[in-house]
Structures are given as C-alpha cells and as structure tokens.
Image (tube, rainbow, N blue to C red):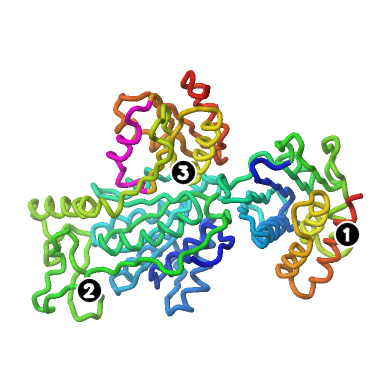
Amino acid sequence: MNEPRLIRGNEACALAAIAAGCRFYGGYPITPSSEIAEHMARELPEVGGVFVQMEDEISSLGAVIGAAFAGAKAMTATSGPGFSLMQEHIGYAVMAEAPCVIVDVMRGGPSTGRPTSPSQGDVMQARWGTHGDHPAIVFAPASVAEIFELTVKAFVVAERTRMPVIVLYDEVLGHTAETVALPEEVTVADRRKPEVEPEAFLPMLPANDGVPPLPAFGDGYRFHVTGLVHDERGFPSDDPAVAGALLRRLHAKVENHRSEIVDVATSHLDDADVVIFAYGIVARAAEEAVAMARRQGGRVGLVRPRTLWPFPDAEIAEAVRGARLVVVCEMNLGQMLLEVERVVAGSVPIAAVLRGDGEPIDPDEILAALDRDMEGALP
Amino acid sequence: MTTNGRLDVRFAGAGGQGIVMAGEVLAAAALRMGRSAAHSKAYGPASRGGASRSDVVVSDGAVGFPLVRRPNIVVALTDEAYRKYGHDHADDAVVIVDVDVAAPRNGALVAPIVETARRIVGTDVASGVVGLGVLSRSLDVFDVDILRGTIAERVPAALEDANLEAFAAGREMVG
C-alpha cells in the first residue's frame, strides 16, 4: 500500500481508471463530476492516453464507444442531465457490445435540478434509462476507497463482458476527501481477442460464456458494428430466431459472470432483529447508526449492495432472513425500496428513510426510524 | 470536547473567503500528526458569495461517518453563513465568529477575521488562514508548526509570508 493521503472521490475515480488501463476519455464537464475530466485531461497524456472534450454528452459516449472498438479501455463521466443524454448510446454499447465505463456522479434532479447537491435519484435510470429489454451492470461505492476499488472493477467487468459498466455515486462522495492508502498494484483484465484466422472470423460468435472475442480496428479482422439486431457475422438480421437468441445471450453474459459482478457487504447480521439496507454515502450513515444502536443494546445489522444491478436478489433475501424489520434508506423517494419489497415479498415489514431535498441522510434519522417503526428496536 | 477520539470542525463563510483551503489545511495537518481525516464541503452554484461550509472530521482511528454532524468547533465568517450553518453544534462547542455575525451565541469569540485578512494579505481569500490561527489557539489539538508548514505549501509563494503573518494575527486574537 502507498502512504495514506487525502483523496477526493472524483480524483480516486480518475486515478483508478488510469490504474486499470484506461487510455481514452471522451467527456463534457458537468458539476459535480468535472474533477474527473480535469484529472484525466491532465494525467492521460502523461501515460500516452487521449483526452477529448466533446461537444456534448451524446458525442462523448459515442467517442468512447469508438475508442473501445479501436482497442482502448475507455470511459466518460457525467451527472444527471448528461447521463440522460448518454442513454441512447448506453443502449448502443449494450447492443454493439462495446466495453466501456460510464461514471454518473448523482446530483439533485429532475432536469438540471440542484447541481451542487447530492442525490440517489438515478439508480433506476441506470437500470432502465435506455430503451429495450437490456441487461445492466451498475456499481455503487460508499467511500473514496471504494470509488477507487469499484472503478477498477468496472473496467475489469467491462472487458470481460463486453458491456458498458456504470459507476454510480453522489455529489458528496465525489467532493469529499478521505484518508486513503491506495494499492500499489491493481488487478486488471483485458478483452479476449480472436484466435482464428481473419478469414474465418465471425465477429459475433460467442465463446462459452456468451462473450464474443473482440479484435481492435486495425488488427486485421474486418467487422461491422451495428445497433440493429445482427447475426454472428455482425450484419443486420430480421429473423425472429436470431433476435431472440441475441437478446437472451446479452442477458446470459451477465448471468454467466454474476459471481464476478455481484458484490454485497454485510455487518452485524448474525443476531439482527433490524436489518438496514443502504448503499453509497447513505450506507456510511447506516454504519454509524448501527454502531450507535449497538451501543444502546439494539440488535441492528446492515446489508449494503456494492452492486446495484443486477440486483442481488439472493444475497438480500439471505440478509433479511430472521429479521423483524427491514429499513431501506436512500436519497430519493423510494427506488431501490421497490426492489427490496419485491425480494422480501411480504415476509418482513419494511420501513423507509427517504430524502429528496438534496441533504445527506444523518445517522440520527435512521435511529429515529427504528424507534418509530419497531417497538423495542432500541431498548 | 471530542467524542470517541473524533473532532468535528466546521468553517462557514462566503465563496472567496478561503474556507475550503482552511479545511484542507486542517485535514492535511491532521494526517501529518498521525491522525485520520475527512474533508467535505457544501456550496451553491455561485463561485463567489453565497453561504458555504467546509467541514473536517479528525479522528484518532479510521474516520467512520465522514460528514460533520454536530461540530465541536465552528468558525463562521459571515452572518449569512452563521445563520445557515453555525447553529447545530455540540453544546460545549467552541464558536468563533467574525464581527459580521449579528447575533452570535453567548460565549462566542468575536474577532475581526475578514478585516484582518484584507489588511495583512490584501484579500478576503486569506480569511480562512486567519480563522485557522484563531482556531489553533482556541484548542490545544493541532501542532502549530505543522499548521504553519501546511499553510506555506498551499498559498502562492509570493504571499507565503503575508499568510503566515495573518495566521499569527489570528492566534493573537485569543486572549
């Protein structure tokens, strides 16, 4: 490990990207993500990479997808309004199977909302914002150290699945500096390249895990890239059998790599009467609330998904087993709450601590909810 | 004053008064003293004016919740910022305010912080440095030489001496 130093969340994100091998950034600055672009603009040329400021967020992700096919590990970063503009190309990256990383530093919305306030209002947009029946991979770090760790992981998963992978955190984490000792080395992954001769190459013929090998433009392999339904040759097809198989394969890629993707942290669950569900910066308040409740003799535990999508159904179901109350905490008016309700399916009562005013949730608010919603939760 | 070896510090002021740098200096100094720290900030869309805060958590061990909750120390440089961010502090908190604050709480230390920054350094941006001086003398937590060294690294070289003089002037405001 390196010496501990103060690092802001957005800086950690950029440092992680470069450590993971990112050598292309296409973006358009927007609060509260702009420090990522600033850092990449300064540092990428130092490692032989390319930084391009594009004219908007649509073209930013377009450039990133192009760089991905040219062989680069590529990323962009934005916030709500820019994330909305990127949705079309997120779908294109899913369909064309372009490995890339998209960071959304969430701010208050809808629309331009409150640029300098935190929010977790984009968690469903990250899942469903682009049209079509697509899979999604989304990570939600809860600290500056986790922003580093999960940004590296986003590149690894993007390379291994040929998917756009989203890293989602909020304004507070982006702008807060924490004491972090960065690792000296990180584990990286590179996309699988074709092993057949160029003449025998079928661009969309998948390997056993459902992921087709991906040559770079210029490697000598000719291939066509399209957002239309396509066959194994990569050319458009109107055959229902091809369309159905393609959609199932796109989903199967995520399922086949699920153990590398799904990541859930837990604490104090063994004897917990109350299980708090929280992610991102809110999970930090929840950790503090658990510590405070435990000091008072309350049997309170925490489950915090570091992967929001695919939603960790089995892990959440296991975490809440035996609980008498589940408390969902998030900085929106109830988005992941719907997923928890789906998984819990009425087996345990669910309370919620929800904030949509752009202020972070405080540990006291969570404790107050325990007191309010379950008699004896805090003896 | 501290809870479980944790100290919550809040600088509140207007954009352009150097409170973000003051928070960064305090957090960096804490690391040099072998502690852990976190620094967070809240500000509006404007780069000048408005009310903003710059919060530091200093901890003997790892910082848990990284945001300031009920500060043990408040340094408020404008009336607006004091009214917005200055109130919800610990009962035994040290409260330091600029003379701009109209109705500080009983027992607050009132000092001409911003005016002193203007006089010595010639700019409002040094107000945070004066505030650090007042703070460092008001509680015996931070190593003064480490604070001086950290300030010297952060300010433009041409203004280093003036900033250190401003820091010293802040310390002299505490009787």
Asked if one can make out residue A359 in the rendered structure from this viewpoint, the answer is yes
Q: Chain of mark 1?
A: B
On-image quarter of the N terminus of chain B: top right
In the image, A211: left or right of B94?
left
Which residues lie in the magenta part?
Answer: A307-323
The numbered mark, 3 or 2, whose residue comes first in the sequence reads: 3
Q: Nearer the viewer, residue A64 or A252?
A: A252
Instruction: Using the image, determine if residue A304 lies above or below residue A66.
Output: above
**Badges 1 and 3, same chain:** no
C-alpha gap between disc 1 and disc 3: 44 Å
Is A364 within the magenta?
A: no
Is A311 within the magenta?
A: yes
**Badges 2 and 1, same chain:** no
Q: Amino acid at mark 1?
A: Ala
Q: Which residue is mark 3?
A: A120
**Badges 3 and 2, same chain:** yes
Q: Amino acid at mark 3?
A: Gln
Q: Which residue is mark 1?
A: B169
> For the point 20% across and 53% down, which residue is it?
A256
